[in-house]
C-alpha cells in the first residue's frame, strides 16, 4: 500500500507526478471514493502532467472520454456511476478499452468489478476532516 497526501489543490500536480513515478508500466486504475472525494480532479491532474491539453472532465453521461497526451498516447477515462449492470458495460465495449494497452482510469469501478483485469490497481481517495485528501494505491 502506497499513500500520497494532497494538502490542497495548489499541490495536486505534485501528488499526480508522484503517482506517475510510482505506477511504473501499470495501465488500469480503479479509483474509488465517496462522491466529491476528488476522483475526477485527481485524474485531471494526472492527465495534465502527461501533457493532455484538451478539456478534462467527468464522463458521467458519455461513460468514457478519450484524451491524447503530448506524446500521442491515449488515455481512457471512465465513469461507471450510471452503469446499472455488466451487460451495459459490455455493450460499450469496455473490455476492448481495458485490454488496449492504454492508460485507463475508472471511476465507480465497483459497478463493473467482474470485468476488471487481474492486474488493475485499486486507488482509494479519501477526504480527511481537515480537507486534505489521501490517495492510496494497492500495488
Image (cartoon, helix red, strand yellow):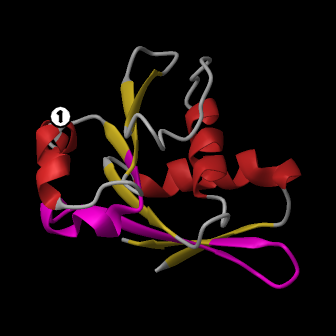
Q: Reply above or below: 2 against 71.
A: below
Point out the stretch of residues depicted in magenta. Answer: 105-134
- Residue wearing tag 1: 100
* Label 1: how many Cα within 10 Å (few below 14, some 14–19, many 20+): few
Place of residue 3 in the rendered image (x, y in percent of width and height, measured from the top left): 59, 75
Q: Position of residue 65 (x, y in %)?
A: 42, 30
90 to the left or right of 61: left
The magenta stretch spans residue 62: no
- On screen, residue 20 above or below 118: above
Q: Horizontally, is 128 left or right of 1 in the view?
A: right
**Percent x, y for residue 74?**
36, 25
State the residue in front, 88 or 67: 88
Say which residue appears at 17% left-offset and 34% top-offset.
100
Q: In the image, residue 111 lies at what x, y percent? A: 29, 65
Q: Is residue 117 magenta?
A: yes
The foreground one among 65 and 3 is: 65
The residue drawn where x is 62% and y is 23% is 55
Name the quadrant of the C terminus: bottom left
In percent of the image, x 42 and y 55: which residue is there?
23
> Which residue appears farthest toward the bottom when viewing the image?
129
Judged from the image, the secondary structure of the residue bearing numbered disc 1 is loop
- Residue at image x 60%, y 67%? 35
Q: Is residue 48 above or below residue 116?
A: above
Q: Quadrant of residue 83?
A: bottom left
Tally the numbered discs. 1
| Front residue of 119 and 104 | 104
Amino acid at each position: 500500500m502506497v499513500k500520497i497526501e494532497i494538502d490542497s489543490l495548489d499541490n495536486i500536480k505534485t501528488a499526480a507526478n508522484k503517482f506517475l513515478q510510482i505506477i511504473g508500466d501499470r495501465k488500469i486504475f480503479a479509483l474509488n471514493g465517496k462522491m466529491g472525494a476528488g476522483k475526477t480532479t485527481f485524474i485531471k491532474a494526472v492527465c495534465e502532467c502527461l501533457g493532455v491539453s484538451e478539456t478534462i472532465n467527468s464522463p458521467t453521461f458519455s461513460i468514457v472520454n478519450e484524451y491524447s497526451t503530448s506524446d500521442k498516447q491515449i488515455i481512457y477515462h471512465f465513469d461507471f456511476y450510471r452503469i446499472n449492470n455488466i451487460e451495459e458495460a459490455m455493450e460499450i465495449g469496455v473490455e476492448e478499452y481495458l485490454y488496449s494497452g492504454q492508460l485507463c482510469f475508472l471511476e465507480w469501478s465497483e459497478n463493473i468489478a467482474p470485468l476488471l483485469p487481474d492486474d488493475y490497481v485499486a486507488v482509494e481517495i479519501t477526504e480527511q476532516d481537515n480537507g486534505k485528501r489521501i490517495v492510496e494505491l494497492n500495488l
